[in-house]
Amino acid sequence: MDTNAPPGRHDYPVFHSITTRWTDNDIYGHVNNVTYYSYFDTAVNHYLIERGGLDIHNGQIVGLVVSSGCTYLRPLAFPERIEAGLRVDRLGNSSVRYGVGIFHEGEADVCAFGHFVHVFVDRRENRSVPIPKPIRDALEPLCVSSD
C-alpha cells in the first residue's frame, strides 16, 4: 500500500456492516467525528468475539484501548449502511494495532480510516499478558506485518 494514499477496500481482508443511528448525526447533519471511534470499537470487538472467542463479560483476559486515531475524508450521515474494513497493522506479544477503514456500503473509496490499539491485560491484575492463542489465531490472517 502507498503510505501517502488513503487505503481502499482492497486493503482490508474482512468487513463488518454497521447501520448509522439517529444519534450519530451532529448539528451539521453528518456523523460526528467521535462516533467513528465507536465504529472502530464495534468492528474490532465484533471480530474478536465472533472469531477469537473473546468473552467481554466474564473473561480473565480483556483488550484495553491505549491509542487510536482517525483521518476523515468524506462525510457519512443517518440513515445509512456502512462497512468497517479491518486489518492488523502490527501484531506484538501483548498488543495489536488494527487498521480500520469506514466505507459507504459497497463503495471502494474510504470515508475515514485510522488505527486502534489494544493491549491485552489480566482483568483482575490490570497487567499486560500475552495475547491468548485463540485471539492470536484469529488475528494472524488479518496481518499486513508482524513482530
Image (cartoon, rainbow, N blue to C red):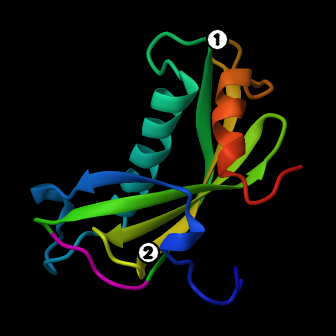
Nearer to me, 131 or 15: 15
Which residue occupies the extreme bottom position in the image?
4
The CA span between labels 1 and 2 is 35 Å
Q: What amino acid does circle 2 point to?
A: Ala
Q: Quadrant of the N terminus?
A: bottom right
Nearer to me, 93 or 24: 93
Span highlighted in magenta in the image: 73-77
Q: Which mark is nearer the camera, 1 or 2?
A: 2
Vertical order, 91 against 56 (above or below) = below
Q: Is residue 63 magenta?
A: no
Is 105 left, or right, of 115 in this rendering? left
Task: Please tell me in which quadrant of the rendered image residue 46 appears.
Answer: top left
Q: What amino acid does circle 1 point to?
A: Arg
Residue 128, horizontal then vertical, whole percent: 77, 27
Q: Which disc number belongs to residue 124?
A: 1
Residue 100, horizontal then vertical, whole percent: 52, 61
Classify mark 1: helix, strand or loop: loop
Q: Is residue 74 magenta?
A: yes
**Could you tell me if the residues under marks 1 and 2 are in contact, i.e. CB atoms within 8 Å?**
no
Mark before the other along the chain sequence, 1 or 2: 2
Task: Please tell me in which quadrant of the rendered image residue 103 appears.
Answer: bottom left
Identity of the residue drawn at 33% across and 77% down: 107
Vertical order, 5 against 90 (above or below) = below
Identity of the residue drawn at 16% across and 66% down: 80
Is 117 left, or right, of 94 in this rendering? left
Classify mark 2: helix, strand or loop: strand
Residue that carries the numbered disc 2 in the rendered image: 112
Q: Is residue 70 visible?
A: no
